[in-house]
Image (cartoon, rainbow, N blue to C red):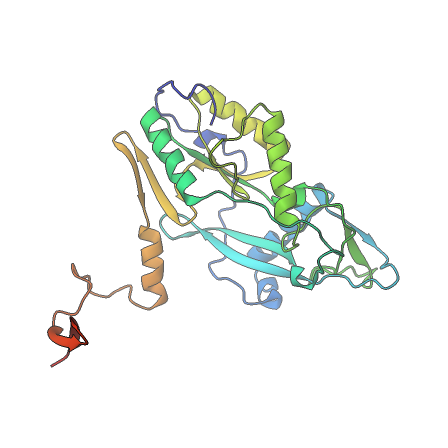
């Protein structure tokens, strides 16, 4: 939270702070494997974007495998990010290490990293509504590869993107990779250190953080803009806008207050079970069901009776 928390301000938007624009061309399907993804140029571009981000952040070095080296496998994860209306707005790709191959005491030590509780998110939204400012959200692009790791970890080359000159080499990690046991804790320490050094203070009730989706607010538009620019200088951001969708919750912020609902989640559930065109009912129960009393021991209970 930025600025004087007791000051009530006029609502404003930081949509103009979206420094990173998204491509208008996205694939509508989610690949089931690498070969399927490589058949579509939009997914290929997303995979290249992930690897280029690794190069910029100096995540790894391609080296000869040391003696008795058992590199950890890597795999691609594909996910379509949807907007509030359910339309695909981004093809998101993650290169993930198969951390289940790691051995405790050899490949990693500490793994625990606390994350925000849902109650803390609701309190923040209520506080923002009471003070009259809109909550904002930002997404750190490839959050985990922002923190150096202490252990010596080797991973195999990404499937479909093996080096033609050095197919037998492996990557030695400098920084954490998604899927590693120690990755969440490493990123938590990185973000916590940056925020504390920037003058922020940890809450006394809930001292946890969420991983890479960050929500924030401030008592003035200037302070919000300053914080957004500060975060963009330190980390590469892929999204920065007014808070609308977070952890499955849809948030509507207006002059009358803040409304939290799950309309999109409900639509997705109906679509999953092919009930999107079903007739809505005010009472979620069959109108033909009749109940009859039935004695069970010393208690009477009702039992469904179809007739």
Of residues 252 and 238, the one drawn nearer to the viewer in this rendering: 252
Left or right relative to 56: residue 136: left
- Seen from the viewer's position, the closer of residues 270 and 297 is 297
To which quarter of the image does residue 15 belong? top left
Residue depicted at 34% across the width and 61% down the height: 269
Q: Which one is in front, 244 or 208?
A: 208
- Quadrant where the C terminus lies? bottom left
Does 99 appear above or below 243?
A: below
Image quadrant in which you'd find residue 114 = top right
Which residue: 44% across, 22% down? 221
In the picture as drawn, the residue positioned furthest to the bottom comes out as 307
- Judged left or right of residue 18, residue 50 is right
Location of residue 105 in the rendering, given as x and y in whole percent from the top left corner: 74, 55
Please name the residue shown 86% across and 57% down the image: 64
In the rendered image, residue 299, in percent from the top left (x then y), is placed at: 17, 71
Using the image, determine if residue 298 lies above or below residue 203. Answer: below
Residue drawn at x 63%, y 57% is 96
């Amino acid at each position: 939270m930025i600025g004087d928390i007791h000051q009530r301000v006029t609502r404003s938007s930081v949509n103009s702070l979206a420094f990173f624009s998204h491509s208008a061309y996205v694939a509508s399907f989610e690949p089931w494997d690498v070969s399927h993804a490589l058949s579509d140029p939009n997914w290929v571009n997303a995979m290249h974007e992930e690897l280029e981000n690794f190069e910029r952040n100096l995540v790894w070095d391609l080296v000869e495998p040391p003696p008795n080296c058992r590199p950890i496998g890597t795999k691609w994860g594909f996910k379509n990010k949807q907007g509030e209306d359910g339309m695909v707005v981004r093809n998101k790709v993650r290169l993930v290490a198969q951390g289940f191959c790691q051995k405790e005491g050899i490949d990693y030590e500490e793994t625990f990293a606390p994350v925000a509780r849902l109650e803390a998110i609701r309190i923040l939204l209520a506080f923002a509504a009471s003070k009259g400012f809109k909550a904002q959200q930002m997404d750190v692009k490839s959050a985990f590869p922002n923190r150096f790791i202490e252990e010596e970890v080797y991973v195999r080359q990404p499937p479909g993107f093996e080096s033609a000159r050095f197919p037998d080499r492996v990557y030695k990690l400098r920084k954490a990779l998604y899927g590693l046991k120690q990755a969440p804790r490493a990123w938590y320490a990185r973000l916590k250190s940056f925020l504390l050094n920037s003058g922020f203070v940890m809450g006394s009730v809930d001292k946890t953080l969420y991983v890479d989706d960050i929500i924030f607010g401030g008592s003035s538009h200037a302070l919000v803009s300053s914080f957004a620019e500060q975060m963009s200088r330190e980390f590469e951001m892929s999204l920065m806008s007014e808070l609308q969708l977070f952890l499955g919750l849809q948030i509507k912020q207006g002059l009358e207050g803040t409304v939290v609902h799950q309309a999109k989640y409900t639509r997705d559930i109906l679509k999953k079970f092919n009930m999107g065109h079903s007739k809505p009912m005010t009472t979620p129960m069959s109108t033909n069901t009749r109940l009859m009393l039935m004695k069970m021991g010393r208690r009477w209970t009702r039992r469904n009776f179809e007739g």
